[in-house]
Image (tube, helix red, strand yellow):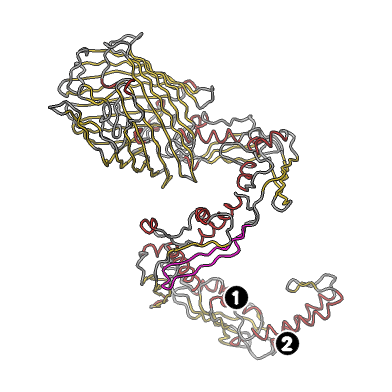
Amino acid sequence: MSEIINKFSLVLIVLNSQLSSPKPFPVRSIRIKTKNRLLSAGCIVLLFLFMQSKTIAQETPEDSLKQGQNLDFSEPVYDGDTPTRYRILGISIEGLSTIEEKDVLARFPIQVGQEITVPGFEIANAVKRLWRQRLFSEIKIEIEKKTDEGVFLLVRVREYPVLSAIEFEGNDELDEEDLQKQALLIKGSTITEQSIAAAKTRILKKYEEKGFLRAEITHELLETSNGRATLKFKIRENNRVIIDRITFHGNQVIDRGDLLGALEETKQNNLWRSIFGRPKLDRRKYEEDKQKLLAFYRERGFRDARILRDSITYSEDKSNLFLDVFISEGPKYVIRNVTWEGNTLYPTETLESVFGFKKGDVFNDKKIKERLTFSQDGGDINSLYTDRGYLTFRAMPEETVVAGDSVDIRIVIVEGNQFKIRQVSIKGNTKTKDHVIRRELYTLPGDLFSRENIIRSVRQLATINYFDSEKINPDIQPRSEDQVDITYELAEKQTDTFNASAGYSQFIGLTGALGLTFNNFSIQDVLDGSAYKPLPHGDGQRLDFQWQFGNFNFQTLSLSFTEPWAFGTPLTLGMSIFDTQQNFTGFIRQTGFTISVGRRLTFPDDYFRLDYSFRYQRNEGGLINFGIFDANAPNVASEFSITQIISRNSTDNPIYSRRGSDFSFTAQLSGGPLPGSVNFYKFTARNAWFSPLAGDLVLMLSAEGGYLGRFSENDFIPFINTFFMGNNGISFIPTIPLRGYEPQSIGALVAGRYTGDLYTKFVSEIRYPLSLNPSAQVYVLAFAEAGNVWLRGNDVNLADLKRSAGIGVRIFLPIVGLVGFDYGFGFDTVPVDRDNNTGALLRQNQGWKFIFTFGQFAR
């Protein structure tokens, strides 16, 4: 009772001071006005007394209430009903097993020599202070001894046990290692009810992701000696819960099938999914899918669409669940008027043209935002301004519903200031030198800020393939009202590649290849010993060595070097030497060199480049074509050729391209007006288009073709220059890949080989990335392709294409490069031999074939 009186007196003192103060006294967000202060004060006193009568016997901190622990620090320290001041003569701790007493006393706020009031607030505060350390499950303070000079306090505690081991029981779907990772409990740490509860929540969440929504977990804490304990989780997984059906209610306009498609991660079961993985409910992804469902509606004009509620029910055996989603579609809105305010740089007509919406168009929330802020093709209002330096430009739309189902859009333009680039910095390039990076940038100090130039710079940095393209981050920081700094944050990746392969050819038997390519070489540092890590790097040059070998003394050696930026300009210079020889029913050797020069163009745009190469090749040994002698073949022939390549590459990534195109046109002249005994001209062209279908799912379409011409019928052309097609393209003979068919098996049968002077090929692929991590980029694909080789122009028949389809995977490893595995089915027959009696061609079905590719052949 004395405790109540003391606290009542304290409240009166506080109220008295408040009643005399002009400021209101805040109690539970209610302000006491002056004229009602006396009445309110009385109510507060009564409320205070009521609350104290409920808690006087046990003053437990809030944390202890949450955990259900007993903190007894009331009666044992009381000495009658009258508050008394005591001097603390000593403090001792009882109940410690793993914690030193000095460590507890260091955290105890009451010190020896201090005076405290009993009963009073000091004891309660001391217990709360200890409780916050989360070391004890029970805390109790007593007066152990009383003298005329003061008292000795005894603090009785019970430590939380130390976790010595974790055991799991009943887990079949998740192994112990996975459960340990989810629990996040560390052996040797104290174990509390809170940490156990958090561990159970994390484990249940993991089970939920696996489809076990009804999993149950209990635990048992088995304390051993020395304050240690073993924590045992008892798991009851129950049956996996499959989403059997998703039902929509209230959808009057949008079909159920379209709504199911809008749910990206939450799917209902069907025959296909029963085979390849039954759908389970992930609550987090389900919540995200509900927002995508509403976005789907708003893209179609239903800006008021709402999800009223949703429910989950289960089948009798609890193995299937049923989702019911109740929707209010609302009216379908159309745009009535679009007005612009604040635009001074561009006239309203220009903004309307870029915005693209006119009166009567269906309201599309997503497209409106894209047209105002950002679109992949750059056709948006924001790009108009930011490409001219208006970094702080803002377009703020205001929508007003009128006439029931129409919307007026008022767009307020805040143009802001025009910014110039003050400084361009580079961060994260540990191997590549700054000048190699800066020469690829389209953002220079002093230029107007341009978002288009930043996007182009990021694309260029991704194209050189020295950095992780997913982590190229331009950090834009305004430094004043009209200046901005740009920092390109980069992450280096492995650029050098080592390749090794083995194969079998029906002509030369077992073949193999070894190669080393250094894509970021530095020739100027070859004399610097400190630059060998393991070889000099950083100047963006390319050094390449390749060796192919096989039976019949078959061997090809080549060494090449390329400088992509000569004399400080985008001028490419390169040189290579090569030597090829074999002894297949006769000796053949081809030796020569190539000198190349190229340059990036600015017209028609700067995606174009022009390359020339001059090649000399000496052919000796009778030039036997697979054992069939050519009557026109000389014993020794020299070949001089010039090749011109016009190309345009606007793809956004050299490994996994999502958008853009890659075009090249090649014209080669050998002999003719040039010296040498080999005479022909050749044209080839290829174009590939990349377009995203949904997210990272990409469609690739390509078409290519070639023509080989002669100056006269008597001109000799070595077999290596005609067109061959089939399999993966990896051969000592340049071959056009066509998956699902044997190597060099397509074309006209001439002198024992299938070849021709014309070819065409079409490819379509759908690609999806499994990992874009630079340490191992992986994507899968499904393909369909067709092609053929013809001997003469009169033989060309586009209805007679050899078709194939299949699936594949591409893996880019930093050391190895791009490696491909395909499984393709050839639909059409191809000739394999001639009948000895009739001379008719014998044809054979191709069927399924496994194809291995690497390097350029895997693209």
Residue 62's label in the rendered image is 1
Q: In the rendering, at what x and y percent does residue 374 appear?
A: 60, 41
Tag 1 secondary structure: helix
Residue 243's label in the rendered image is none
Label 2: how many Cα within 10 Å (few below 14, some 14–19, many 20+): few
The amino acid on which the numbered mark 1 sits, given as a three-letter code, is Glu
Q: In the rendering, at what x and y percent does residue 216 appear?
A: 43, 72
Residue 778 quadrant: top left
Bounds of the magenta segment: 306-329
Query: Quadrant where the N terminus lies?
Result: bottom right
Q: Which residue is mark 2?
A: 5
Say which of marks 2 and 1 sits in front.
1
The amino acid on which the numbered mark 2 sits, given as a three-letter code, is Ile
Q: In the rendering, at what x and y percent does residue 843 appear?
A: 22, 33
Q: CA distance from mark 2 to mark 1?
A: 24 Å
312 drawn magenta: yes
Q: In the rendering, at what x and y percent does residue 616 appear?
A: 32, 15
Q: Main secondary structure of the magenta part?
A: strand
682 drawn magenta: no
In depth, the one of 808 and 117 nearer the eye is 808
The residue lying at 18 percent from left, 17 percent from top is 629
> Which residue is situated farthest in the left direction here?
837
> Which residue is situated farthest in the right direction here?
35
Label 1: how many Cα within 10 Å (few below 14, some 14–19, many 20+): few
In depth, the one of 367 and 821 nearer the eye is 367
In depth, the one of 143 and 498 nearer the eye is 498
Vertical side of 328 occupied by 721: above or below: above
Circle count: 2
Vertical side of 311 occupied by 44: above or below: below
